Amino acid sequence: MTTDVSRRPAARHRPGAPPVPRRRRSLADLLDRRATPYLFIAPFFVLFGIFGLFPLLATAWMSLHDWHLINGDDGWAGLDNYRDLLTDSSFWNALANTLSLFVLSTVPQLLLALGVAAALNTALRARTVWRAGVLVPNIVSVVAVALVFAQVFGKDAGIANWLLGLVGIDPINWQAEKWSSHLGISVIVIWRWTGYNALIYLAAMQAVPADLYESARLDGASAWSAFWHVTVPMIRPTILFTTVVSTIGGLQLFAEPLLFDGQGEANGGSDRQFQTVTMYLYEKGFFLFDAGTAAAVAWLLFLLIAVVAVGNFLAVRRAVASR
């Protein structure tokens, strides 16, 4: 036997009985319900304001002043720091070096990481060992990596020149020429970050449904065709993520070119052949103590990264979507 609870008459107040008190929310209870969620997320915004927003605004203010690193503000400069940069040949040289190193290191790095991830996604023996091994270059200190590769690309006793000598090629002064120094620095960046991106791609590949590969095999698709028409489109968000992150990192190269010649000087070689924008910023701010110009460089670099990152995002999204 069933009863319809919704049809039961509401309880009525009996005559002579004490009134039923209505529950009221106190002010403390209301504040607890409304304010507690904001208190939980407040630490992030406090730390961001101190270490993120304040330095950002302070840098923008410094870029508009003739600011000495030690003596402080020497007066309003307006846009003079930006105008001086745009007429400085050293700045344009550093910008060209940065873009060259970015292209030479980022594009091969992401393609190689995609291939490594595809290999690690197969039925390999000791897969855990291989997957952990590809991350080792990223764990090693960047200073140690740069110093080791500076010896690898040494002019007199470097391993690279020794290998070239085996095939009859004369030794190369890797640090002296622009093309050779860019190639050497790109090798360092590729060696250090390929494994990191490969593991990100591998995690995305393992989330691809297996029935898609089964359908591709039933349609007669080869492993190569299934990779480009099933795997790559399915991990498109991950590819876009690594593209944007690699763009940000590639345009902020600092430690690798700074230590490439083993000298640790910010001018990037005798002819500034591998000086990047961040090295130029470092030279202006900490060698010449021109903090105002260094702040202007930082903001121009920020704008450059934003433009290139958005461009790469749109280009990669269109390329992957077309497959």
Image (cartoon, helix red, strand yellow):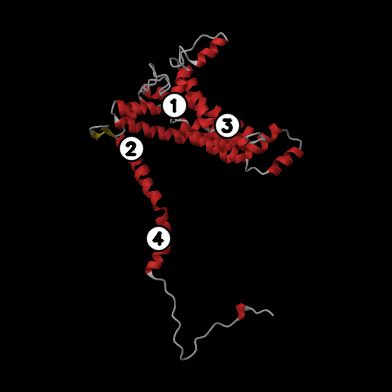
Residue 135, how many percent across, how many down? Answer: 53, 33
- Is 208 left, or right, of 49 in this rendering? right
Q: Earlier in the sequence, mark 4 or mark 3?
A: 4
Local crowd at mark 1 within 10 Å, few (<14), some, or many (≥20)? few
Q: Dot 1 lies on which element?
A: helix
Dot 1 amino acid type: Ala
**Whole-Å distance between the Cαs marked 3 and 2?**
36 Å
Dot 4 amino acid type: Ala
- Is 104 left, or right, of 35 in this rendering? right
The residue indicated by pointer 1 is: 144
Is any part of residue 96 visible from this angle? no
State the quadrant of the N terminus: bottom right
Local crowd at mark 4 within 10 Å, few (<14), some, or many (≥20)? few
**Whole-Å distance between the Cαs marked 1 and 3?**
22 Å
Task: Identify the residue at the far bottom of this view.
Answer: 16
- Which quadrant of the view contains residue 279? top left
Dot 3 amino acid type: Ala
Q: Earlier in the sequence, mark 2 or mark 1?
A: 2
The residue indicated by pointer 2 is: 59
Q: Dot 3 lies on which element?
A: helix
Residue 57, how many percent across, how many down? Answer: 34, 41
Q: Dot 4 lies on which element?
A: helix
Task: Give the numbered dot on residue 216.
Answer: none
- Is 274 left, or right, of 288 in this rendering? right
- Is 255 left, or right, of 67 in this rendering? right
Residue in view at x 67 percent, y 44 percent:
209
**Whole-Å distance between the Cαs marked 2 and 4?**
33 Å
Q: Nearer the viewer, mark 1 or mark 3?
A: 1
Local crowd at mark 3 within 10 Å, few (<14), some, or many (≥20)? many
Residue 56, how many percent across, how many down? Answer: 36, 40
The residue indicated by pointer 4 is: 35
